[in-house]
Amino acid sequence: MITKAHTPTAGFSTFVANVVTWLQLAGIILPKKFDTWYKKGLELSSSTLESVKLPDDTYYAFGNNLFYALALYNSFQMAEFFGCTAIAHKLEEFCHSPIFGVKKSHYLWILRQNEEQTSRRLQKLGFHLSYFELYDSDILAQLFGSIFFIQNLILLMAKKYEYAELQYVKMNDVLKASSDLIYAPQ
């Protein structure tokens, strides 16, 4: 059972619960490996923390297929936690047009499998780039390991950069407008 928090949260537990629910609705039986997947996500995030910087400006998250959904989730978390402009793209679509709007001050993260060549090409352009190889032959291990990786990396970054509160909570006017748009009757 998930209990309601008395303070604003990033919704980590409800996100995982929703993913589990949707998989079960699709008839996918989940093995009880959450501890293993969680540990893998924590290990990867801890080992990559030093190579990751908090964006000063705009943050892009890239991924294809399953990793696009994770890049989108990651961009939401970056915006809520740090108040930065965070944009998700499918990697192949990004290279067709949005790439021309990227500045040297922007940060790029690639959440992917086997995209070393793309990563090297973007690094040669001088972009701040972090590449996270998240492949696992077990698609469920890949999905949940990646979710736990993103969640823990965000928490580790918040600690590293001394963020004690989610930034979206401080944006009262924006938060009210967002709530009105989402929850107001149409």
Image (cartoon, grey):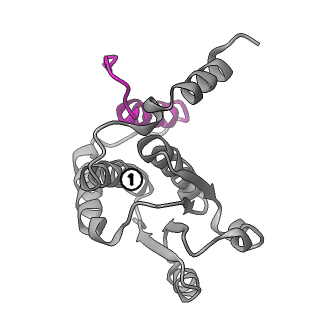
Q: Is residue 2 magenta?
A: yes
Where does the image place residue 93, in percent across and percent down from the top left? 72, 66
Where does the image place residue 4, in percent across and percent down from the top left? 34, 17
Which sits in the foreground, 32 or 106? 106
Side of 170 where 61 appears, left or right:
right
Q: Quadrant of residue 132?
A: bottom left
Q: Is residue 17 magenta?
A: yes
What residue sits right under mark 1 in the picture? 150
Side of 33 where 119 appears, left or right:
right
Q: Residue at x 63, y 24 (%)?
A: 177
Residue sticking out furthest to the bottom = 124
Where does the image place residue 92, in percent across and percent down from the top left? 69, 70
Amino acid on which disc 1 is placed: Ile
Q: Residue at x 64, y 18 (%)?
A: 180
Q: Quadrant of the N terminus?
A: top left
Q: Residue at x 58, y 21 (%)?
A: 176
Judge whether 177 appears above or below 24 on screen. above
Q: Quadrant of the C terminus?
A: top right
Side of 6 where 90 appears, left or right:
right
Answer few, some or many: residues within 10 Å of disc 1's Cα (few below 14, many 20 plus, some between 14 and 19). Answer: many
Q: Secondary structure at mark 1?
A: helix
Q: How many marks?
A: 1
Q: Residue at x 28, y 39 (%)?
A: 164
Where does the image place residue 53, in percent across and percent down from the top left? 38, 65
Residue sticking out furthest to the top = 185
- In the image, the segment drawn in magenta is 1-26
